[in-house]
Image (cartoon, grey):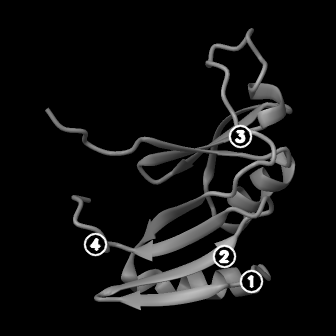
Amino acid sequence: MKFTKIVETCIYSNKLKEMKNFYINNLGLEIVSEENGRHVFLKAGKSMLLIFNPESTLSDSNSVFPVHGAITPPSIVHFALEINMEDYEKWKDLLQRNQINIEKELKIGNSKSIYFRDPSGNVVELITANAWPVDN
């Protein structure tokens, strides 16, 4: 018995409108659903990025979801979105056009990564395919 993949990544922010705008308009993720002031669910390829407002989810017992959220002060997370190597420079150009500060670029083996932050300070990494020994 084995896990097949991570289906969703959850991050927390009380800046849902800014986060939604950032991930949709700057990175091209697709909106799946949202609840005003509570959450935004976005599609990222074959995975989901869920953004919850911790102020709503830490105490909302009427929700279909269990109570959860970042404890104050909210933690900053790091997650990576996979891109194709041939699109690396296009992604870099897109970030620069959208005035998103690239904090670091790395090349490890045959893989390249670009690191930047979202409006809540989370570290977002764009990493080329095959960086990790997992099936695509």
Q: Is residue 127 above or below residue 45?
A: below
In the picture, the disc for residue 116 is 2
Instruction: Say which residue appears at 63% left-offset and 13% top-offset.
Output: 64
Residue denoted by label 3: 70
Residue type, label 3: Ala
Q: Which element type, helix, strand or loop, lies under badge 4?
A: loop
Real-space Cα separation, disc 4 to disc 2, in angstroms:
20 Å
In the picture, the disc for residue 101 is 1
Residue type, label 2: Phe
The quadrant of the image that shows the N terminus is top left
Q: Which element type, helix, strand or loop, lies under badge 2?
A: strand
Categorize mark 4 by other alpha carbons within 10 Å: few (<14), some (14-19), many (20+).
some
Instruction: Say which residue appears at 77% left-offset and 35% top-offset.
Output: 54
Whichever of callouts 4 and 1 sits on the residue coming sooner in the sequence is 1
Q: Are marks 4 and 3 in contact (CB under 8 Å)?
A: no
**Residue 85 image-quadrant placement:** bottom left
Real-space Cα separation, disc 1 to disc 2, in angstroms:
6 Å
Real-space Cα separation, disc 2 to disc 3, in angstroms:
21 Å
- Which circle, 1 or 3, is nearer the viewer? 3
Q: Which element type, helix, strand or loop, lies under badge 1?
A: loop
Q: Which element type, helix, strand or loop, lies under badge 3?
A: loop
Residue type, label 4: Asn
Q: Are marks 1 and 2 in contact (CB under 8 Å)?
A: yes
Whichever of callouts 1 and 2 sits on the residue coming sooner in the sequence is 1
Residue type, label 1: Asn
- Which circle, 2 or 3, is nearer the viewer? 3
